[in-house]
Structure formats: C-alpha cells, structure tokens
Amino acid sequence: MVTTKSRGDEAEERALQHLLAQGLTLVERNYRVARGPSARGAEVDLIMRAPDADGTLVFVEVRQRSGRTHGGAAATVTRGKQRRCILGAQFYLSNLKVWPPCRFDVVAIDGEEVTWLPAAFDAS
C-alpha cells in the first residue's frame, strides 16, 4: 500500500542519492525538534556536508509533486516551511561548539525529474 509517508520517504531517498552523487555526505536525516503541544515543531529533511574546504553544512528541504502543475514542487517551499527548516537548523547548530558555514538547499522532485536548488533561501 502506498501512503503519503512512503512517498515522502522515497522522495527523501531519491534526493539523498542525488546529493551523494554530487559529492555531498550525509550528516543526519529527518532532524526534528518538538516545540510543544500547540506549536508546530521544526524539521530538516537532510543535513549534508558540502565537499568544499569550509565544510559547509547544508540543510535540505525535499519536496515532491507528481508533476509541475500549480508551480511544481519547488513552489511549495513556503515561507512557513522555510521558517521551520531554519528553526531546525538553529537547534542543530546550538549543539555545536563552532558553527561552520551553512546554507539552505531545496531538492524538488517533479515526477521523474530531480532538481537541486543550492542556496534556495536564507535565514534572513
């Protein structure tokens, strides 16, 4: 049986494989922070390390749609979704002694097409 969760897990796996092929390495998957019973928590789908000399941490939002109607998968990364990803990144970084350079990427999957958008949004 295909569920929303199984489709999401498949999309994250496709995104992970795509980023690994680009030279990034996996740091953490499905990083979640609870905010309380009445507030939405934070989530980062994938945390990767870029192959650059700085060791840039890449916080990745994965979005999937069956096609490009209504703007496609990338268009679904709303400001609210960005805020939850940023909050998750802040919590993750708060556990590190030294903050490396960071960025927020999006991997948009529209049908069979995988599009990687480096630095798709920032924390400002």
Image (tube, grey):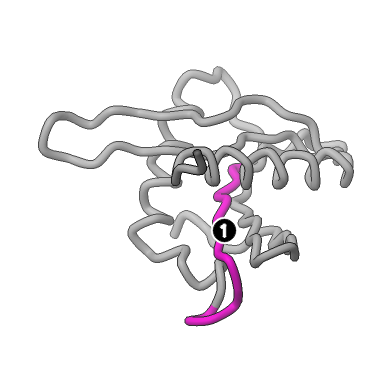
Viewer-side residue, 110 vs 108 = 110
Percent x, y for residue 47?
A: 62, 34
**Residue drawn at x 70%, y 58% as measured from the top left:** 118
Side of 70 where 72 appears, left or right: right
Q: Nearer the viewer, residue 84 or 63?
A: 63
Report the residue at 59% width, 29% height from top.
29
Q: Secondary structure at mark 1?
A: strand
Q: Position of residue 85 (x, y in %)?
A: 44, 46
What amino acid is at disc 1? Gln
x then y, percent, for residue 120: 61, 63
Please tell me which residue lies in front, 117 or 112: 112
Query: Is residue 69 in the magenta section?
Result: yes
Does the magenta portion include 30?
no
Above or below, 71 against 115 in this view is below
124 left or right, relative to 96: left
Q: Quadrant of residue 32?
A: top left
The residue beneath circle 1 is 64
Residue occupying image coordinates x 45% and y 42%: 3
**Residue farthest along the bottom direction in this orientation:** 70
Q: Residue at x 47, y 54 (%)?
A: 123
Question: What percent of the width, then of the height, locates residue 18?
Answer: 80, 47
Q: Where, quadrant-wise, is the C terminus in this rendering?
A: bottom left
- Position of residue 83 relative to residue 120, above or below, is above
Q: Which residues are magenta?
A: 59-71
